[in-house]
């Protein structure tokens, strides 16, 4: 996929707004007040976990070589093309949970509605309308960004350059003092 959900761990407060936004987007009503009255309650397809001092929003990574797609015996899991998200066709899913067992990130879950499994689909309806995934749009600190892989590479280069400049400056100041 060309675009991914990038998580800036320094900005994530662990407020779980992304989970709420995701659940509301997955609801029939598409509103918070309507969603809390639905039965079963809508299900978030992102989960914020606290690990090693960081809040980490976990959702499907839409792997290029998705193991969930490979093991699905009915072909319920797949993508339209290499640039589209990995999605589950619920009417084809038989609930065997093979995908759940092979997901390296543990982000496929049994649906609260029963029988089938569910996972992040990057809010495909929203993408078709030109909007970002609900979790990204709703994040109050912009810890989640929907960016291209080129934009991610640029962020990584900038971070590495900042570290390199800081190391050089420290090295130069150590030489001047010594």
Image (cartoon, grey):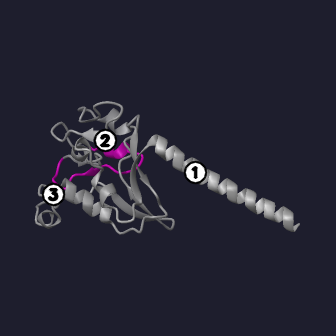
Disc 2 and disc 3 in contact, CB within 8 angstroms: no
Which residue is pictured at 16% across the width and 52% down the height? 114
From the image, tell me which residue sits under label 1: 158
Rounded to the nearest angstrom, the CA distance separating label 1 from label 2 is 40 Å
What is the quadrant of the N terminus in the image? top left
**Residue 139 place in picture, x, y as percent:** 34, 62
Tag 1 near tag 3, CB within 8 Å = no
Mark 3 or mark 2, which is nearer the start of the sequence?
A: 3
Marks counted in the figure total 3
Q: CA distance from mark 2 to mark 3?
A: 30 Å
> Which residue is tagged 2?
98
Query: Between residues 115 and 164, which one lies in front from this camera angle?
Result: 164
Q: Is residue 75 above or below residue 171?
A: above
Label 1, residues with CA under 10 Å away: few <14, some 14-19, many ≥20: few
Q: Are marks 1 and 2 in contact (CB under 8 Å)?
A: no
Q: Nearer the viewer, mark 1 or mark 2?
A: 1
Element under disc 2: helix
Residue 83 showing in the rendered view = yes
| Secondary-structure class at tag 3 | loop
Q: Is residue 98 magenta?
A: yes
**Residue 157's x, y, as percent?**
58, 47
**For the residue carrying disc 3, how many other residues have a C-alpha within 10 Å: few (<14), some (14-19), or many (20+)?**
some
Check disc 3 and report the residue beneath it.
30
Q: Is residue 70 left or right of residue 113?
A: right
Q: Quadrant of residue 76?
A: top left
Asked if residue 137 is positioned above or below residue 124 in the image, the reply reads below
Q: Which is nearer the N-term, disc 1 or disc 3?
A: 3
Q: Earlier in the sequence, mark 1 or mark 2?
A: 2
User: The magenta stretch spans which residues?
Assistant: 97-115
Q: Residue at x 46, y 58 (%)?
A: 8
Residue 54 in the image: state x and y as whole percent: 48, 65
């Amino acid at each position: 996929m060309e675009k991914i959900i990038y998580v800036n761990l320094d900005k994530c407060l662990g407020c779980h707004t992304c989970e709420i936004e995701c659940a509301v987007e997955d609801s029939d009503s598409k509103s918070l007040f309507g969603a809390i009255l639905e039965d079963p309650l809508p299900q978030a397809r992102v989960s914020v976990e606290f690990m090693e001092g960081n809040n980490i929003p976990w959702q499907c990574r839409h792997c290029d070589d998705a193991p969930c797609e490979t093991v699905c015996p009915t072909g319920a899991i797949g993508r339209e093309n290499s640039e589209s998200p990995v999605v589950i066709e619920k009417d084809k899913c038989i609930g065997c949970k093979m995908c759940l067992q092979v997901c390296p990130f543990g982000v496929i879950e049994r649906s609260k509605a029963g029988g089938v499994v569910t996972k992040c689909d990057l809010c495909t309806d929203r993408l078709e309308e030109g909007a970002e995934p609900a979790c990204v749009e709703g994040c109050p600190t912009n810890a989640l960004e929907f960016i291209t892989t080129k934009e991610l590479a640029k962020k990584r280069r900038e971070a590495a350059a900042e570290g390199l400049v800081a190391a050089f400056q420290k090295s130069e100041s150590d030489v001047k003092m010594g």
